[in-house]
Amino acid sequence: MRTIYRAFPVIDPATIFRQVREHNPILDAQRFHLYASGRAALYHAAMCLKYSGIQRVYAPEYHCGVEIEALVRAGLIVHFYPLEDNLDCDISWLQSHAIEKGGALLIIHYYGFPQPLDKITTLCREKGMPLIEDCAHALYSSCKGRMLGTFGDLAIFSLQKTIPLPNGGGLLINNPELCDPLPGAPCNDKVLWKIAARSMLDFQADKTGVMAVIARAILTLYANLVKDNVTAMPLRTTNTLEGNEEPDYYHVAHQDYGKGIFPFASKLLKPSFWQDIVQQRRNNYVALEKELSAFSVFSPLFETLPEGCCPLCFPVRVSDNDLWAAKLREQGILPFVFGRFAHPLVKKSGQHGGGWQTNIIGLPLQQQLSTVDCCAIWRATNKLASNSIVLSRG
């Protein structure tokens, strides 16, 4: 069984019994609330804003769709704003258009890289707009020595993208004038137990020794007996606005924007030191950056790795991310594809959602991968790149 290089970490069974306690700048914040997912956290954030009189929100046209649906389900009117080529908010456009009273601004720190927060916070102060930081990609990223998620009035996090969990999201409220959110609905079903068990088996199967052999045997037996794979996200979901089904990489079973965190997941939140996570991800980013810089087929999305940034993955520009994702999976590399399908409201608004949906893919660099693993990822992508050049010339 070959090694699988995953975009997100899997659960180490040893962490269940590990007694680690450190001050966590996000998870230990005074008004930090746990939910089932980042989308659930955003739904409750939107409800807090709605209760304070906010009626509309300005959101980026490049998104994965579920965050927009969370805002819609909370009853907010959504307007979309464009982005610069480097995915920074188009401040000039916002200066000219975001002038309606009772509006809030949602920003996304794409792939863990911070938005231009000095300009954004100044804009929000001038216009009296509450700021929502979407840190689904950016847990433990910082800017100028300050954690992302602490600049806005509220911030949301998708915890399982950085911490090995079966599910988990968080809402941080920084504005003392905002009310506390409602707790999430109970979330303790058998699907999540299956996801947790599969995640621990995947972790063990990537190791060596007797336990690895046993884990691989169980996974093989499970694959033969059960048709559906609990860790493979379905490619279809029901869109509540259109009343039809539209492809979506980010749908999960029993999707509910009001659910709380799985109790078992809450016990796995702090088994490792967050600073070690940041350092390993940064080391892996630098390793991949050095190896990929010589190949024109894969060009890094960002020119530099900012100080304090905890990258979610190594985003690169490609000609067709569906094609490249399939090629990478054949090599045992499970990439991160974000925003492949924009929310239908983008089309209704007359905007196109930017050009990022089809030409960005994220190579894995999460903390469970070593720099040696990153070199293996590079060799696989190098081979694919070389074959692509040969085929295009042929």
Image (tube, helix red, strand yellow):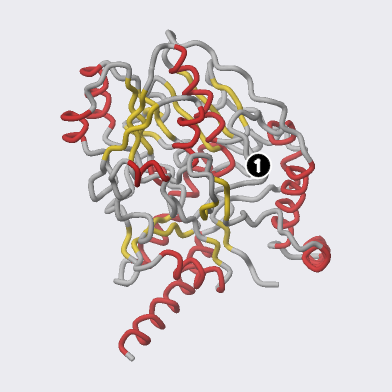
Q: Single out the residue that lies furthest toward the front.
A: 243
Residue at horizontal 27 percent and vertical 24 percent from the top: 121
Relative to the observer, which residue lies in front, 26 or 168? Answer: 168
Quadrant of residue 229 within the rendered picture: bottom right
Relative to the observer, which residue lies in front, 84 or 165? Answer: 84
Where residue 75 sits: x, y (%)? 47, 24
Quadrant of residue 320 within the rendered picture: bottom left
Quadrant of residue 348 within the rendered picture: top left
Marker count (numbered): 1
Taking 384 as reference, is 101 left or right? left
Taking 314 as reference, is 222 left or right? right
Image quadrant holding the N terminus, namely bottom right
Image quadrant holding the C terminus, namely bottom left
Taking 166 as reference, is 376 left or right? left
Quick check: 16 above or below 129? below
Q: Name the residue type under label 1.
A: Leu
Q: Single out the residue that lies furthest toward the top.
A: 177
Relative to the observer, which residue lies in front, 312 or 304? Answer: 312
Residue at horizontal 62 percent and vertical 65 percent from the top: 4
Where residue 36 sits: x, y (%)? 63, 33
Please name the residue that numbered disc 1 is placed on.
Answer: 165
Residue at horizontal 50 percent and vertical 10 percent from the top: 179
Where residue 164 sits: x, y (%)? 63, 44
Quick check: 163 above or below 378? above
Residue at horizontal 26 percent and vertical 28 percent from the top: 120
Per the image, label 1 sits on a secondary structure element best described as loop
Quick check: 316 above or below 27? below
Crowdedness of circle 1 by 10 Å Cα count: few (<14), some, many (20+)?
Answer: many
Where residue 173 sits: x, y (%)? 47, 19
